Amino acid sequence: MKISKYIFLAVGFAILIFLFKKMGITTTLQYIKAIGWGGFFIICSIFIFSNIFLAYAWRVLVNHPIPDNQFYKFVLARIAGDATSSINAMGAVAGEPLKAIYVRDILPLRIGLATVVLDRLIHTVSNLLMVLTGMLAGLFVFRDKFFNNLLAFLGLLLFFIILLLFMVRILKNHHKGIIISLVEKLPPFIKSRFVTDSLRQKIKKTDDEISYIFSSDNTVRQFYISLSIHYFAIIISCSLEIYLIVKFIAPATNLALSEALFVYIFGFIATSALFFVPANIGTSEGSYSLALKLLGHDPVIGFSVGIIRRFRTFIWAGIGIALLFYAGLIKKEVAPDDNK
């Protein structure tokens, strides 16, 4: 795994170097400098609001009394946990338990773990919905292929609706528990070695918390509310970020908001497909460059957008890692039912 990681990292840097030479280092640097410190601060600030809404989408799923003045801890936990996904797309999975641990002093760990599992599920559903949105944006961006794009969009929309309804129905009627059912499918030699009776009890409690959100129409509504907040927070903040970056570095470029939306989702799909490249080095910048070129704009602008977004990612990843480090220095009290 380590060897393959280094190989893919080297490939990513090779792509990045190639793009720098292809686009022109001088031109790219001019675009990057054009954003200025003020513009870069505005770009970074967008994600303060994004993280607040995403934290609230997580909070909606929590079936536990939390004082309103403690909500900021959900925001900090969101920033801290998501710092891992900035390093590697697969690191997002590892970051989920960190969020539950971060708020352990105000939320029992078993409830925290259950809600972050649901939050991750909602994130996946939201990603599918964003692909749909990208296709919808394509209807307006590529008008010469409107009919073909419309058929593809309607087909994917129908698939998404069926998938969502099927998933909610399974979760509502799966009395045995989602996590424990997955554990039971593990090879026998793994279960006999790692899955103890104590672990089964803890998994059962976590499954009970997950089941609660689908126990009534009112709680299912919480799931849909969280999904809506999650979807709009990401798609608005990321599209607005790309739109503003282009306006800052190339004011003469006539980029519409629908095009900015397309650029973001095009990059999202490309980097998701190439998740094995650590930190999406090269692939992220290349996808934005290609998207802008498809839209008839200068691909160097897209490449510069990718570089600036990476700088913004470094800032937020640094803040998240600092929060994790700080939280590790604080002695947290264990919630009364954590060990039950």
Image (tube, rainbow, N blue to C red):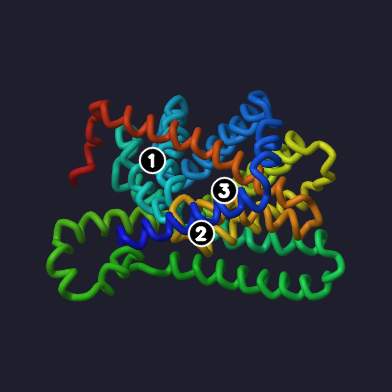
Q: Is residue 290 left or right of residue 108?
A: right
Which element is circle 1 on?
A: loop
Foreground residue, 62 or 11? 11
Of residues 322 and 279, the one drawn nearer to the viewer in this rendering: 279
Residue found 82% across the figure and 64% down from its top: 142
Question: Marks 2 and 3, how far apart in space?
Answer: 10 Å
Mark earlier in primary sequence (2, 3): 2
Tag 1 residue: 64
Quarter occupied by the N terminus:
bottom left
Q: Is residue 74 above or below residue 173?
A: above
Q: Which of these two is toward me, 266 or 54? A: 266
Q: Position of residue 293 (x, y in %)?
A: 75, 57
Q: Residue at x 60, y 42 (%)?
A: 307
Q: Residue at x 66, y 24 (%)?
A: 38
The answer to which of marks 1 and 2 sits earlier in the sequence is 1
Q: Is residue 142 left or right of residue 115?
A: right
Residue 219 visible at all: no
Name which residue type carries label 3.
Answer: His
Identify the amino acid type marked 2: Thr
Q: Secondary structure at mark 3?
A: helix
Hey, what amino acid is under mark 1?
His
As drawn, the label of residue 93 is none
Q: Closer to the camera: disc 1 or disc 2?
A: 2
Counting from the top left corner in percent of width and height, residue 8 is at: 43, 59
- Apparent side of residue 198 relative to residue 269 in the rendered image (left or right): left
Q: Identify the residue under disc 3.
A: 230
The numbered disc on residue 124 is 2
Rendered residue at 83%/69% (across/down)? 146
